[in-house]
Image (spheres, grey):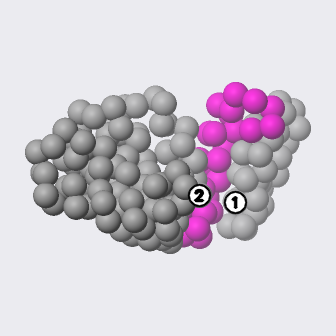
Amino acid sequence: LLEVGRSSEASQLLSRLKKDFPKHPKVEEALYFMAWADFRDDRFVEAAEGFYQFFKKFPHSDKAIESLLRSANAYFSAKQFRKALELYNDVLRQGQGAFKKDSNTGIAWSYYKLNEFDKAGNYFLTLARNAESKDSKAEQYYQAIHSYYSGEAWSKGIEVANEFVKNG
């Protein structure tokens, strides 16, 4: 049902499974996909709470850290940037390298949305310096420079622009 865009129906069925059969082996999968259905239907706070509940209930699942990241992303989509920041940092504390870049990107954008441009610039700069592709490096340098300029840290923006030209 989720794959064909009928997430509301899918969510109802999954919710019934969770309620009627709490010990069923598919409850783990049901919780995850209920949160995913909420996200797809732009119910971001519900999605964030669902993904977080999944993380807490199944901390050893293969999807645990991913669900924590998705919870942070859902809070970001709901414009709850402080809560998103908290969860992005939780993902980093979990030590999962696969989600480190996504978490740092989320942190950078959260600081930017909170008008904490210096912090955003610092995160974007770190992402630029560690970027794997030339296009990604250029994009992250651009965001760093833009963040510093938005915060009126002109000299820092110029310094980073010069670094990009030199190392770009």
Q: Is residue 119 magenta?
A: yes
Label 1: element kind:
helix
Residue 6 vs residue 73, the one in the foreground: 6
- Name the residue: 15% across, 60% down: 19
In the rendered structure, the answer to whether residue 38 lies left or right of residue 132 reads left
Q: Distance between the residues labelled 2 and 1?
A: 10 Å
Residue 3 vs residue 142, the one in the foreground: 3
Look at label 2 and name its amino acid: Trp
Question: Counting other residues with Cα less than 10 Å from the Cα at mark 1, is it few (<14), some (14-19), or many (20 or more)?
Answer: many
Across and down, in percent, residue 78 comes to 48, 70
129 shown above or below 115: above
Residue 116 vs residue 53, the one in the foreground: 53
Residue 147: which numbered mark, if any? 1
Q: Which of marks 2 and 1 is nearer the N terminus?
A: 2
Residue 119: which numbered mark, if any? none
Residue 109: which numbered mark, if any? 2
- Name the residue: 63% across, 39% down: 127
- Name the residue: 68% across, 67% down: 151
Q: Does the magenta stretch include residue 81?
A: no
In the rendered structure, the answer to whether residue 49 lies left or right of residue 81 reads left
Give the magenta range.
Answer: 111-136
